[in-house]
Image (cartoon, helix red, strand yellow):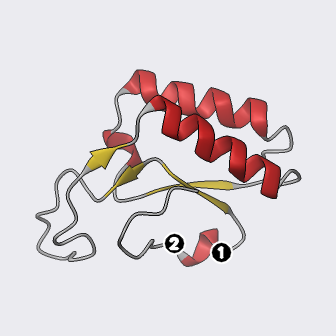
Amino acid sequence: MNTAGHTLFRPPAEAGSVLVRVADGCPHNACAFCAMYTGVPYREYATEELTACIAEAARKHPHARRVFLADGDVFALPRETLSAVLALLRASFPRLA
């Protein structure tokens, strides 16, 4: 898994999910109610990093049924990138719900 220099936050409902970090920080990072990513510059991971991260997660958790895409806002990724990540997850984790 990619390991940035900051704490990875996981919602309680995702406690049993495999974590796959697809970006660092949050692209907006200015919400009045949230200080989770203060000082963390936003960075989307390159395709090669994502592929390696997903392959490592699949090796460690071959029977996983749930994956949580982290960090701040996965939907800020370009649609093509997110589609590619989802396709790779489906191919790597055949038991995903």
Picture coordinates of residue 5, whole percent (x, y): 36, 70
> How many other residues sit within 10 Å of disc 1, few (<14), some (14-19) or many (≥20)?
few
- Observer-nearest of 12 and 37: 37
Residue sitting at 51 percent across and 72 percent down? 10
Residue sitting at 35 percent across and 73 percent down? 6
Q: Is residue 46 left or right of residue 89?
A: left
Q: Amino acid at mark 2?
A: Arg
Residue for badge 1: 15
Q: Which element type, helix, strand or loop, lies under badge 1?
A: loop
Label 2 with label 1: CB-CB less than 8 Å: yes
Q: Quadrant of residue 39?
A: bottom left
Question: Taking 34 as reference, is 21 above or below it?
Answer: above
- Observer-nearest of 46 and 23: 46
Question: Taking 94 as reference, is 6 above or below it?
Answer: below
Residue for badge 2: 10
Question: Taking 10 as reference, is 52 above or below it?
Answer: above
Picture coordinates of residue 34, whole percent (x, y): 22, 75
Residue sitting at 40 percent across and 41 percent down? 45
Residue sitting at 69 percent across and 63 percent down? 17
- Observer-nearest of 15 and 2: 2
